[in-house]
Amino acid sequence: MLKHSVLAAALAAACLLGGTAVRADQLDDIMAAKKIRISTDLAIPPSGMMDGSMKPVGSDVETAELLAKDLGLEIEWVQTTGATRIPNLQTNKADIVISTLSVTPERAKVVDFTAPYAALQSVVGGLKTLDVKNWDDLKGKTIAVSRGTTQDTALTNRAKDGGGFNVARYDDDATMVTAAVTGQADFVATSATIVNQVGVKNPARAFEPKVLITTFDLAMGVKKGEPRLVAKLNEWIAENIKNGKLNAIYKKYHGTDLPENMRGAS
């Protein structure tokens, strides 16, 4: 009986170890499926948008397409907003997020980040006709922001410290921009690129960056505990920064080069 018990225990342990050894992680799952589910907001030009034929385009879209092509994978787009990017990873709706996702300590507690593939200048933008140069000039004003973004966090913290302005929250960048275009908002907190889009949509209400909030690295987001997937993505990012392809995509849509310290990376 003792021999049988020892043998059974040994077999159980072997099965357990064997099961652990052959368990496929997310990178294995993606490569086996020959498809990668990428969460991207397609309503925040020029990073993500739909063209006249309803085809996804933009800097994040082209970055995702280049990644999928290099890995030999098909893309399944998972539409998102600023507030649902991280939940899409946590609920396994998406494999990765490529959607102007800024790297912050708070987010790093719940998702893992790759190396940066782009950068974002976060600003308060307003009508060109308004004389605003600093935070003091924004006292008594209402600033529109997309809910759940880093700009929302920054405004909330500053308001708590006596910022003296009001915050109007919108569910996504598209509705926030619409508010600016239609005259419902004279100030928005978002990326400098999106600020410039207001005047493109309505030349009579041209906006410009007024106050710098901060400059963020943009990285791909991955569910916690997938180091092989993060390493694979980092390898791809390093190669495509070095060969200039990521800089070319960024400049095509944003009109400027990536920060010099990024372009010098390898």
Image (tube, grey):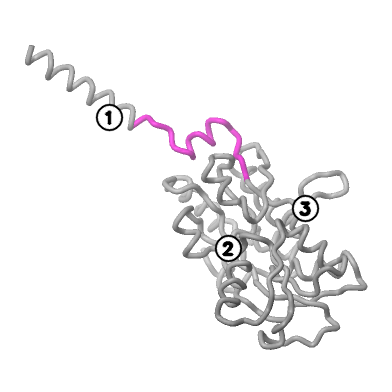
View extreme (left): residue: 2
- Which of disc 2 and disc 1 is earlier in sequence? 1
How much space separates mark 3 and mark 2, taking CA atoms? 19 Å
The x and y percentages for residue 72 are 61, 38
- Please name the amino acid that badge 2 sits on: Ser
Q: Characterize the local packing of mark 2: few (<14), some (14-19) or many (20 or more) Cα atoms within 10 angstroms.
A: many
User: Residue at left 63%, top 68%?
Assistant: 151
In this rendering, which labeled residue sits more in front, label 1 or label 2?
A: 2
Return the disc, 3 or 2, that comes first in the chain's sequence.
Answer: 3
Image mark for residue 1: none
Q: Position of residue 160 (x, y in %)?
A: 56, 76
Mark 1–mark 2 contact, CB under 8 Å?
Answer: no
Front one among 83 and 240: 83
Give me the disc on residue 102: 2
Q: Amino acid at mark 1?
A: Leu
Asked which secondary structure carries label 1, the reply is helix
Q: Amino acid at mark 3?
A: Met
- Mark 3 lies on residue: 49
Q: Which residue occupies the foreground of this view, 49 or 150?
A: 150
| Residue beneath the point at 48% across and 39% down | 26
Q: Quadrant of residue 1?
A: top left
Q: Which mark is residue 17?
A: 1
Is 186 above or below relative to 5?
Answer: below
**Magenta extent:** 21-38
